[in-house]
Image (spheres, rainbow, N blue to C red):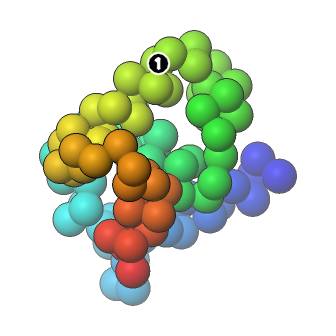
Amino acid sequence: MCLDLIEGIVASAVNDNGDIDTSLYALLTPSEVQVAKFIKVGMSTKEIAQSLSVASKTVENHRNSLRSKLGITNKGINLRNYLISLSA
């Protein structure tokens, strides 16, 4: 399952020309990009933390940073749906 997830993340980061698509994630740190990709596939904070071998609080901090950098001020907006809509 982890290998399939990693392959999916790599495939989603590569555009049709085979280049890395950096337009969406240009202002994010590599860790934030990684967390965002896990969020997009539907993983919970706890699952992401376990996969990355970090504390759940670290993932929460990345989630908050993502919201801030992407201009999501309304807590009612689902971060996963927002990320999916950006890449569509």
Against 9, residue 63 (above or below) is above
Pick the front one: 48 or 8: 48
In the image: residue 45, left or right of residue 77:
right
Residue at the image point whose x is 39% and y is 50% from the top = 76
Question: Label 1, on which residue?
Answer: 58
Picture quarter containing residue 22? Answer: bottom left
Q: Amino acid at mark 1?
A: Thr
In the image: residue 49, left or right of residue 21:
right
Pick the front one: 36 or 77: 77
In the image: residue 31, left or right of residue 45:
left
Q: Position of residue 59 (x, y in %)?
A: 49, 26
Residue at the image point whose x is 70% and y is 34% from the top = 47
Task: Give the class, few, some or many, for how many residues have Cα within 10 Å of label 1's Cα (few <14, many ≥20).
Answer: few
Against 50, residue 14 (above or below) is below
Residue at the image point whose x is 65% and y is 40% from the top = 44
Q: Position of residue 25 (x, y in %)?
A: 26, 54
Q: Position of residue 23 (x, y in %)?
A: 20, 65
Q: Position of residue 75 (x, y in %)?
A: 35, 43
* Residue lying furthest bottom: 16
Residue at the image point whose x is 47% and y is 64% from the top = 81
| The C terminus, quarter of image | bottom left
Pick the front one: 12 or 18: 12
